[in-house]
Image (cartoon, helix red, strand yellow):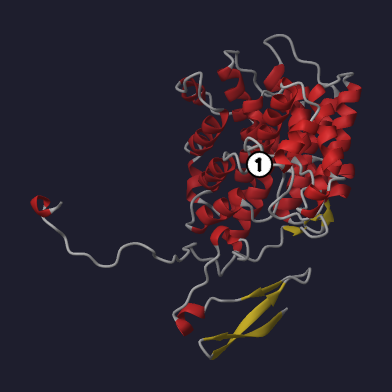
Amino acid sequence: MTGNVELIIDGRTLNLPTTVGSEGEVGIDIATLRNQTGCITLDPGYGNTGSCESAITFIDGETGILRYRGYDISELAEKSTFIETAYLLIYGELPTRPQLAEFSELLSENQMLHEDMRHLFNGFPPTAHPMAILSAMINAASSYHPNIINKREERFPWHAARLISQVRTIAAYSYRKAHGLPTIYPKTNLKYTANFLHMMFSHPGEDCELKPEIVKALDLIFLLHADHEQNCSTSTVRMVASSRANLFASASAGVCALWGPLHGGANQAVLEMLEEIHSEGDDGSKFLNEVKNKVGNRRLMGFGHRVYKNFDPRAVIIKQQCDKVLGQLHKSDPLLDIAKKLEEIALHDDYFISRKLYPNVDFYSGIIMRAIGIPMDMFTVMFAIGRMPGWIANYKEVMEDPDSRIARPRQIYTGATRRTYQPLDARV
């Protein structure tokens, strides 16, 4: 649906077209603004800028709604799996039984890395961060499959399956490398998430126990992170894709964007905060008072969200799963007790309520991963594995858009005006 809006600049009235989304969002098309007026918009952080039209994910931050392709996240979390949801995001519809079987077969066929890539892993120092390895090795993997670089459209299902499948293999290999452990190969008889845990925690000749509740919990974490509209990393993937870079290069760029502590590193920051509170013998009450009174630059991590001004719907789901996992594992975790105390106080304190600081998905995901045995430096890698279907779906959308143009933002220049070059001896 389209319409028009009048904009007055320096007494001139401009008639600009509008686009209305399927959920009623209105976007003002300013593509001709500079040509007509010489002006551009300035929107640091792009908080009010729509960079694209997309049919993949809908978020209503005011009411706490998240939907993948029209399906509510709570319904998918209850009834679907990560792989089924990945298919939904990439291809737009839930798969039929034959389609899901074919997709799963493609994942199994493409889960092995080229054997020569093992030598590349050995080139990283033991101190290398898993996200650095992940980004580099995704790019490296593409060089073993030249048809990825050639971008033949009919090969896209293979490229997409190869990337989704191999990202977990690369992640597991990087973990084993960092801990001096031998490589564990994937098994074709294991499903996606179980296979990842097998590669992470098994030993040669001795497979790890794959507890259903653990597999389900990690699969849910992947599903909840599968896409989240035009966030920093997804926008990065789309920007790189706009240059017609290949799928693996675009995803590698997404990994680098996700690595930042303000994005994918947020769940690690939550756990570090909880550990700090625990080390001080605090149940969270003293910490929150210091946050409110701005003592010692204390920051409450895992609360609030750039988009959600209500409860993050993913946080509600993952909190229930967190309680289940710890209960089924018969584990008590003092950090979970502190987390619950922080939540209880914050949800009834006017200071946090007035600022709309509600728990987000990062608040509980780190505790689940800690219970599973995943080390903290791998938390962001888990996020990247989960987000891969969303990146691929957005990449596909860019490539299939006949009106897609290379992304090229403008700027407001604030530097020096024209100056005359001075010879070296004349400079003071």
Q: Where's residue 167, x and y in %? A: 62, 34
Of 27 and 274, the residue lying toward us: 274
**Residue topped by disc 1:** 161
> Residue 198 appears in which quarter of the rendering?
top right
Query: Is residue 73 something that shows in the picture?
Result: yes
Residue at 48% from the left image edge and 51% from the top image edge = 245
Reply above or below: 347 against 178. below
Reply above or below: 111 against 178. below
Residue at 64% from the left image edge and 18% from the top image edge = 184
Query: Does residue 46 appear to the left or right of 364 in the view shown?
Result: left
Q: Quadrant of the N terminus?
A: bottom right
Query: Does residue 185 appear to the left or right of 125 in the view shown?
Result: right
Residue at 77% from the left image edge and 27% from the top image edge = 194
Q: Name the kind of residue labelled 1 in the image.
A: Ala
Q: Where's residue 380, x and y in %? A: 64, 35
> Residue 264 appears in which quarter of the rendering?
top right
Count of numbered circles on the image:
1
